[in-house]
Image: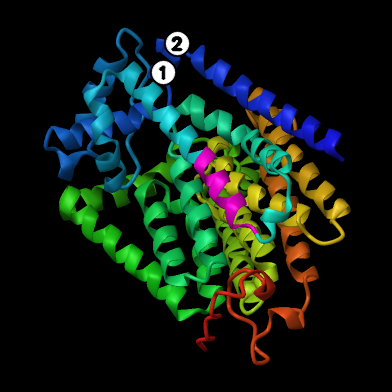
Amino acid sequence: MERKRLLAGGLGGALVLAYLVLWLGVGALQIGRSDFTSTYVGATLLREGHGASMYNEALQTPLHAALIAPDREGNLPFVNPPLAAALALPVSLLNLDDAYRVWSLLQFALLVISVVVAIRAAPRRASLPPITLAAIGLVALACLGTWATLLLGQWDGVSALGLAVAYACLRHRRPAAAGAVLAVTALIAKPHLALGLAAFVIGVRDRRLILGAAAGVAASVLLSLLVAGPGGIAGFVGSAMHSTTRWELANMVSLVGISGSIAGNGTASHVLAAVGSLVAIVIAAALGSAARNRPARLEAALAGAAVLSLLASPHAYWDDLALLVPALAWSFTALAARPGGARRLGAGVVAAWIAISVAAFVDIASNAAKPWGVLTPWVLIGAAALAIATCYRQGAPPPSEMVDGVTPEMGPPAELAPDVRPLSVHPA
């Protein structure tokens, strides 16, 4: 068993190292064509006092052209929320190449921290040797989404860390903090990735969790108003809506990628994707309901909701697979620490994780559309099905997790936290 852990950790570590080496080899031309340029342009316009008009492409285009000269690649519009521009403002003081390096390393560091947080919060993780925990962390980080986040200078480290911290808060029975963290981190950069997670929050039907999320949304909107004013928020909404028709749908890893492969970029694709997304959101809410009063279901339910969030997103690419990094970390830790082991289930999770990265690599290599169409969302559907099946297999809570005949809404199993007073159940 120890050899298998060493092998898994070694392979994961080798992949992560390879990602970093490839990232170090990125040149000025690739940096100028990376997604980070849109963040840099948005932050620069905000710093120069154009907060209310930073989504105006007439302002973005000449700035972008000057940044990447002599390359003549077209403008990549800034479509993240105003808070993203505010958070990235300090790196806009650097030249583009240095800012890209700093930003990518920061996002990678956030992914690493998200793995550490997820592992430390998982139930019974203290029963596992350090070598197992290290192997789990490296395997989780070996996701192709980590590589894409590094190369593109994307924001997914923020989203992953928010999910990991929210999970830890739920495990430690702090639902209000979990809701607030999840809402704020989603609204910083990629709110479209949180549709399934929002449904999960509602499905749990814990008023503290919902109120915490509502407070996070209110705080984010208020801060956005301070950063960019009503004009900036209106500009973001318009840009976000327009972005759904700007890109090739068949290249996306969400359900819209499947509809785009089948029906192209027309209205039919958007309608098909919207129906599929609605189904994914409803299932995510059902997972939240399934996890209510059943702490043992939290890992599988929240991981499933994260996968469904990706599937439901109207705009998701390969870097967004990094959202699943902490979900894998807490899932593997919980499985490895289960009494008697969970070899078959663990093997299924490993297979799903490998399949997701392999499918994403094949999609990237083949441009996702020829000859078989996009593969990644199909594999994500399988991963969601595995998480759903795992969640419902947990069954009713054992007596050891009940207090006066009622199970605490969230938190570690009672026998692991005798010094923590269980929270009372708040009916919806």
The question of residue 121 being in magenta is answered with yes
Q: State left or right for residue 371 relative to residue 243.
A: right
For the N terminus, the image quarter is: top right
Asked if residue 30 can be seen in this view, the reply is yes
Could you say where residue 323 lies in the image, as x and y percent from the top left? Answer: 55, 46
The image shows residue 396, relative to residue 61, as above or below, that is below
**As rendered, which of 296 and 218 lies closer to the eye?**
296
Could you say where residue 45 lies in the image, as x and y percent from the top left? Answer: 19, 33
Q: Quadrant of residue 64?
A: top left
Asked whether the residues under the numbered discs 1 and 2 touch, taking CB atoms below 8 Å apart as contact, a structural biologist would say: yes
Q: How many marks?
A: 2
The image shows residue 254, relative to residue 168, as above or below, that is above
At numbered mark 2, what does the secondary structure look like: helix, strand or loop?
A: loop
Q: Which residue is mark 2?
A: 27
Which residue does the image show at 58% across and 78% down from the upper left? 409
**Structure colour scheme:** rainbow
The image shows residue 417, relative to residue 221, as above or below, that is below
Q: Which residue is mark 1?
A: 31
> Which amino acid is tagged 2?
Gly
Could you say where residue 262 lies in the image, as x and y percent from the top left? Answer: 67, 43
Q: Is the magenta region chiefly helix, strand or loop?
A: helix
Q: Quadrant of residue 8?
A: top right
> Which amino acid is tagged 1?
Ile
State which region is magenta: 112-122
Asked if residue 381 can be seen in this view, the reply is no
**As rendered, which of 78 and 119 lies closer to the eye?**
119
Residues under labels 1 and 2: Cα distance?
A: 6 Å
Which residue does the image show at 27% across and 40% down from the upper left? 85
Q: State left or right for residue 10 relative to residue 108.
A: right
**As rendered, which of 19 and 380 lies closer to the eye?**
19
